[in-house]
Image (tube, rainbow, N blue to C red):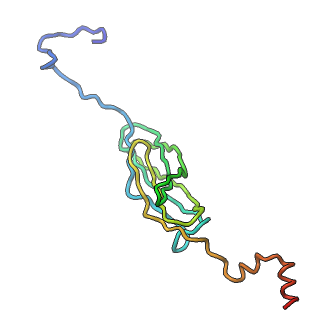
Amino acid sequence: MAGNAFAEDFNDIDAPFHFWDLEQRVPDFTFVGEPSVKYGGDSVRVDEPVEITAAIINNGNADGNVQIVLELVESNGARTRVDARQLEVAPGTTTVYEGAWVPSRTGTMWLEVQILGSETLQTPTLRVKEAESEGFMGTVSEVNPVVLGVLVVLS
């Protein structure tokens, strides 16, 4: 083979003299555990950032770049890509994907983190609420000072 002489005695396709297991040196990416979701306060609010983290391990025997996609899935099935990036992972090591999403409206939705061509993990369902107001003084401070002055004088 490959220009080298070899003996054909005791060597047949059905009964080879010897064989070698070939090892393919490729990366093999999988998630470790479930994705983590962090947000301020007791609930998710409009215009407040939500942080998503997911750990990825390379179980293969070669360096490689893993492509991660973060998608928002709404209760009606609509999907929106929030983030996509490539991370380098050495064999036998773990790296952490860190993404962020800022909700722009209320509703029921969840996030999915995907290794392209492989696994997908889903966060728990998130119920996005309206942004909290700053209370009475917050609303008063947003009023035009001239209009506020006229109202005080007239009353």
Above or below, comparing residue 64 to residue 55 in the picture: above
Q: Is residue 26 found left or right of 70 in the rendered image?
A: left
Would you say residue 10 is visible in this rendering? Answer: yes
Q: Please tell me how many numbered marks the rendered image carries.
A: 0
Residue at image location 17% in from the left, 10% down from the top: 7
Quarter of the picture containing the C terminus is: bottom right
Image coordinates of residue 14 in percent, x first then y, are 13, 19
Residue at image location 53% in from the left, 61% down from the top: 51
Image coordinates of residue 119 in percent, x first then y, are 38, 48
Q: State which quadrant residue 34 falls in.
A: bottom left
Pick the residue in front: 4 or 108: 108
Residue at image location 23% in from the left, 25% down from the top: 20
Q: Residue furthest bottom?
A: 155
Q: Is residue 23 found left or right of 34 in the rendered image?
A: left
Q: Is residue 38 found left or right of 10 in the rendered image?
A: right
Above or below, comparing residue 84 to residue 16 in the picture: below
Residue at image location 36% in from the left, 40% down from the top: 60
Image coordinates of residue 69 in percent, x first then y, are 49, 48
Quarter of the picture containing the N terminus is: top left
Image coordinates of residue 111 in percent, x first then y, are 47, 57
